[in-house]
Image (cartoon, rainbow, N blue to C red):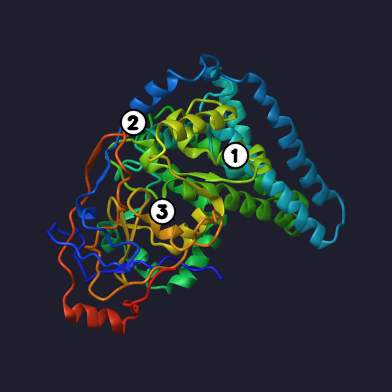
């Protein structure tokens, strides 16, 4: 049975966050309770991107940093599959079950085209501007995203300010923003199990809706002479898909485009939400701190152009995804304590079952239920894997929540033993005062304090 890691409950705090205060309350029965030194145990400091790239360039072969023009040929089989599927739906009177199967195949072709277009527009395939833009436009045609908008939104803003609050267009909300947005407040009044299902379902439309938001956000900031081009790169694909529906009829169009678009959205977003949404907000662009790589079967990596290797992509955005596994090997060798990786399904499960509101850069909160979760690098790995032993693919085990233990308890795992090659360390966050007995009784009434148990 799938279970969600239980968070700690905490008394109500204002949107401004929590002031630091001294004191921690370890408990031998709590896997997250620190030992005598955990309250001050060091955590890795953030390193700027340049430090990783300089180190890796000393050990990686030079030729891998050149474009791979032959990879443009991937367009041929991907387009052939998508076009053949659409023609089959339009020309043959097939059973709806066969049409649905074809729609899934078309959707996977759309997703692969989108992921390949992401690689192309980073310049790792061809660097001739007109050819790069043409290939990128074709790849992103199903999503109605133009290359100019994509480069501004993704290449410049997202990669330049990854997980930087207020700058990264893909970063999630803070507690202060939650209190200013009634619609978001309504979402968190929904029961967590229902919200988890809705989050999973929302992946099928998220990418398309987010791209429209990015168009509205960045179009006014672009030079006037570029705006007509950006709008045309959005409207032409939309018009083409509407025209396709008018030609083949709505029933066939559902299987030729609408369902494939939902499948493609879900596939792409299942990666995107795991890339950063479990990571801390960071004032320094440290890709090993603010990014997550996931593991998938090898054939999936081939189909999706190694998009699972996302930390590696943020270290070298312009590097061909062909060499991402090599960069991964070196990252895990040089920075084993900093590198974050988990199975794709587990990361997706955690995204769906934890809140997406940052109480502070290193903690997520369900503001309605006052439940706090750590992020990667600050305890989430330990929370997600508690009780799983050596089973790398087991479901994250739930943790007990004890009376008197609040968000003030140290959430970060104890630091690994120091070594000559360990990265620089800095003290972890201080703990806060425990909740009052009144707050504990209130939490019990809400179901937030579990009986004292031990984790197997």
Residue 203 percent coordinates (x, y): 54, 56
Question: What is the distance, in whole Å, between disc 1 and disc 2 at their CAs?
Answer: 39 Å
Q: Is residue 339 visible?
A: yes
Disc with the residue nearer the chain's start (2 vs 3): 3
Residue marked by disc 3: 381
Specify whether 296 is left or right of 175. Answer: right
Asked if disc 1 and disc 2 are in contact, CB closer than 8 Å, the reply is no
Helix or strand or loop: what does disc 1 sit on?
Answer: helix
Residue 143, by quadrant, is top right
Q: Is label 1 or label 2 in front?
A: 2
- Disc 2 residue crowd, few under 14, some 14–19, many 20+, Cα 10 Å: few
Q: Is label 1 or label 3 in front?
A: 3
Helix or strand or loop: what does disc 2 sit on?
Answer: loop
Specify whether 187 is left or right of 68. Answer: left
Quadrant of the snapshot with the C terminus: bottom left
Disc with the residue nearer the chain's start (1 vs 3): 1
Helix or strand or loop: what does disc 3 sit on?
Answer: helix
Q: Is residue 216 above or below residue 375?
A: above
Q: Which mark is residue 114?
A: 1
Judging depth in this view, the residue of 451 and 93 nearest the camera is 451
Identity of the residue drawn at 22% across and 71% down: 11
Quadrant of the snapshot with the N terminus: bottom right
Q: Which mark is residue 263?
A: none
Residue marked by disc 2: 421
Identity of the residue drawn at 52% across and 62% down: 395
Identity of the residue drawn at 14% across and 61% down: 23
Question: What is the distance, in whole Å, between disc 2 and disc 3 at their CAs?
Answer: 22 Å
Residue 121 percent coordinates (x, y): 53, 29
Residue 400, by quadrant, is bottom left
Q: Is residue 401 above or below residue 55?
A: below
């Amino acid at each position: 049975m799938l279970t969600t890691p239980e968070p700690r409950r905490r008394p109500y705090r204002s949107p401004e966050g929590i002031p630091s205060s001294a004191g921690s309350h370890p408990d031998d029965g709590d896997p997250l309770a620190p030992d005598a030194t955990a309250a001050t145990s060091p955590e890795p400091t953030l390193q700027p991107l340049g430090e990783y790239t300089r180190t890796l360039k000393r050990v990686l072969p030079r030729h891998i940093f050149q474009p791979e023009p032959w990879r443009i040929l991937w367009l041929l089989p991907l387009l052939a599959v998508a076009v053949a599927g659409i023609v089959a739906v339009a020309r043959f009177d097939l059973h709806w079950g066969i049409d649905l199967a074809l729609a899934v195949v078309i959707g996977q072709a759309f997703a692969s085209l989108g992921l390949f277009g992401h690689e192309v527009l980073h310049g790792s395939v061809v660097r001739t501007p007109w050819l790069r833009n043409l290939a990128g436009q074709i790849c992103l045609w199903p999503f109605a995203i133009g290359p100019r908008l994509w480069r501004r939104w993704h290449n410049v803003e997202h990669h330049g300010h990854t997980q930087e609050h207020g700058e990264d267009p893909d970063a999630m909300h803070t507690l202060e923003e939650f209190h200013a947005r009634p619609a978001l407040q309504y979402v968190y009044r929904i029961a967590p199990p229902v919200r988890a299902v809705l989050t999973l379902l929302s992946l099928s439309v998220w990418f398309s809706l987010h791209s429209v938001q990015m168009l509205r956000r960045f179009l006014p900031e672009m030079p006037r002479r570029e705006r007509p081009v950006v709008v045309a790169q959005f409207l032409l694909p939309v018009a083409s898909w509407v025209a396709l529906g008018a030609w083949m009829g709505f029933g066939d169009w559902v299987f030729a485009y609408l369902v494939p678009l939902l499948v493609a959205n879900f596939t792409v977003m299942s990666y995107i939400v795991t890339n950063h949404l479990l990571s801390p907000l960071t004032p320094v662009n440290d890709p090993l701190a603010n990014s997550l790589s996931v593991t998938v079967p090898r054939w999936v990596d081939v189909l999706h152009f190694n998009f699972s290797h996302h930390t590696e992509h943020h270290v070298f955005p312009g590097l061909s995804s062909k060499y991402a596994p090599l960069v991964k090997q070196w990252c895990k060798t040089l920075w084993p304590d900093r590198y974050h990786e988990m199975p794709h399904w587990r990361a997706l499960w955690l995204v769906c079952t934890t809140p997406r509101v940052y109480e502070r850069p290193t903690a997520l909160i369900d503001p309605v239920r006052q439940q706090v979760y750590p992020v990667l690098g600050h305890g989430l790995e330990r929370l997600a894997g508690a009780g799983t032993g050596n089973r790398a693919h087991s479901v994250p085990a739930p943790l007990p929540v004890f009376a008197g233990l609040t968000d003030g308890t140290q959430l970060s795992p104890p630091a690994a033993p120091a070594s000559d090659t360990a990265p620089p360390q800095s003290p972890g966050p201080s703990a806060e005062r425990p909740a009052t007995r009144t707050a504990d009784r209130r939490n019990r009434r809400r179901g937030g304090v579990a009986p004292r148990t031990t984790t197997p």
